[in-house]
Image (cartoon, grey):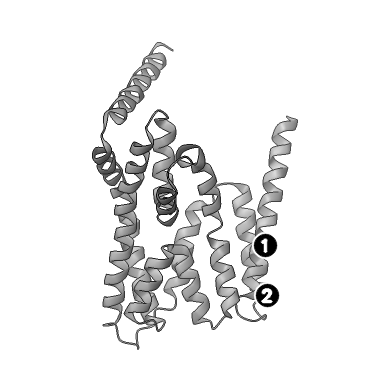
Amino acid sequence: MKNAKQRANRRAAAIEASRTRALARNPLQSALHGAVQSTPFLLVMIPFGLLFGVVATKAGFNLPEVMGFTVLVLAGASQFTAVQLMTDHAPVWLVVLSCVAVNLRMAMYSASLVPWLGSATQMSRAAVAYALIDQTYVLSIDYFQNTPRLSMTQRLSYFAGTAVVMCGSWILFCFIGATAGRAIPASIPLDFVVPITFLAMIAPALRTPAHVAAATVAVVVSLALAWLPAGVGPMIAAVLAMLTGAGVETLLLRRRASR
């Protein structure tokens, strides 16, 4: 019991010291801190950026199209989704709708950042919205919540540091991948890479029964509706999967509340 109390005290002291250091940083130091804390994510960002560049090139996009798509959209999952659907000759409305559905989580990200960045200038909020991706969000919301007394300038500077590393590396390695992809002979098939990439992205997120149920319904319904026009089956499957996940989560919450 005594050791546990000592460990708790040491942890509390370490957190307080970290907060004191964070509050003492100027904007440049806050940005550098965000950039440094982003570097572990490069282990994922670099191969996915290279992969998207290669896959998009092999799907028929030229270099300006790949880079224009990358800079304007700046959303890896949506970019992979769009390339896959366009390769399958899906209609434009379905490509757009699918990309919007994949990026719906950004609306939740934005809502949770409002208490921390909602009073920033309109231009700052527009910049944050552009650079808001999974990695910049996760790093920033954790930093803001652990250090709630940060000034607005410190928060924006920290976010900017994460965005420069994450978004900059995504654009850079998409360019390298697209350039390298042009050198790969057409006789080498790479179509299998996109499904494998999605599996690698989704599998670690299956952490609760609701996630597993939603993923199972999505797979089963997609396979059952494979005879429909390209992309229609997955869209129906996505809606049913979301309803299933929400239903399972609600059921589990009610069961816990009744205990």
Query: Which residue does the image show at 64% across and 81% down from the upper left?
Result: 229
Which residue, given by chain and number where applicable, does mark 2 sit on?
225
Task: Determine whether, in the image, residue 226 is placed left or right of residue 48.
Answer: right
Q: Tag 2, which secondary structure?
A: loop
Q: Position of residue 105 (x, y in %)?
A: 54, 54
Task: Determine whether, in the image, residue 174 is placed left or right of residue 223.
Answer: left
Q: Tag 1, which secondary structure?
A: helix
Q: Position of residue 99 (x, y in %)?
A: 53, 67
Query: Which residue does the image show at 34% across and 38% down from the upper left?
Result: 153
Say which of 39 and 164 sits in front.
164
How many numbered marks are there?
A: 2
Would you place residue 93 above or below residue 32 in this image?
Answer: below
Would you place residue 6 above or below residue 162 in this image?
Answer: above
Query: Which residue does the image show at 68% across and 75% down from the upper left?
Result: 225
Q: Quadrant of residue 22?
A: top left
Say which of 204 and 235 sits in front.
235
Amino acid type at image mark 2: Leu
Query: Which residue does the image show at 63% across and 49% down from the upper left?
Result: 210
In the rendered view of the protein, which quadrant contains the N terminus?
top left
Q: Position of residue 193 (x, y in %)?
A: 42, 72
Q: Position of residue 140 (x, y in %)?
A: 40, 42
Which residue, given by chain and number where applicable, does mark 1 sit on?
239
Q: Which mark is residue 117?
A: none
* Spatial CA span between label 1 and label 2: 13 Å
Task: Determine whether, in the image, residue 133 is placed left or right of residue 94.
Answer: left
Amino acid type at image mark 1: Val
Say which of 85 and 140 sits in front.
140
In the rendered view of the protein, which quadrant contains the C terminus?
top right
